Image (cartoon, rainbow, N blue to C red):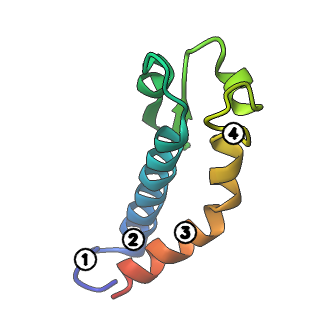
Amino acid sequence: MAGKYPTFEAYVTGVQTKVAEEVFRRIVERTPVDTGAARDSWELNFVPAGHRISSDIPYMNRLEHGWSQQAPSGMVRITLMELDDIAETIKRQENR
């Protein structure tokens, strides 16, 4: 941690940001593609309370719940099940 981040708060913010970016990457990568609109609709926003991942596609909930053969188990739910592992991996990388 020393050297990469000037304070513990900066470290926490840095790890949170990297976790959010990895979660975002995995969700986008898992989103089924027909026209590409659903995959392209994902947004990662940095908000005062942390990070927000969202999509304005009206049928995204259907995709998440198996509407597409390409992602029968969804994208978000699977990624959230991996959240602890994602966070641990990034913390290890940041502590080198």
From the viewer's perspective, tell me whether residue 73 is left or right of residue 16. Answer: right
Front in this rendered view, residue 56 or 71: 71
> Cβ–Cβ below 8 Å for labels 3 and 4?
no
Q: Secondary structure at mark 3?
A: helix
* Mark 1 → mark 4, Cα distance in angstroms: 36 Å
Nearer the N terminus, badge 1 or badge 4?
A: 1
> Cβ–Cβ below 8 Å for labels 2 and 1?
yes
Q: Identify the residue under disc 1.
A: 4
Q: Identify the residue under disc 4.
A: 74
Q: Residue 9's spot in the image, x, y percent? A: 42, 67
Nearer the N terminus, badge 3 or badge 4?
A: 4
* Mark 2 → mark 3, Cα distance in angstroms: 13 Å
At 22% from the left and 82% from the top, the residue drawn is 3
Residue mark closest to the camera, 3 vs 1: 3
The circle on residue 25 is none
Q: Secondary structure at mark 4?
A: loop
Q: Identify the residue under disc 3.
A: 87
Q: Secondary structure at mark 1?
A: loop
* Mark 3 → mark 4, Cα distance in angstroms: 21 Å
Nearer the N terminus, badge 2 or badge 3?
A: 2
Q: Residue 55's spot in the image, x, y percent? A: 54, 23
| 8 relative to 10, above or below | below
Front in this rendered view, residue 75 or 89: 75
From the viewer's perspective, tell me whether residue 29 is left or right of residue 68. Answer: left
Say which amino acid is labelled 1: Lys
Say which amino acid is labelled 3: Ala
Q: Residue 13's spot in the image, x, y percent? A: 42, 60
At 43% from the left and 21% from the top, the residue drawn is 36
Nearer the N terminus, badge 3 or badge 1?
A: 1
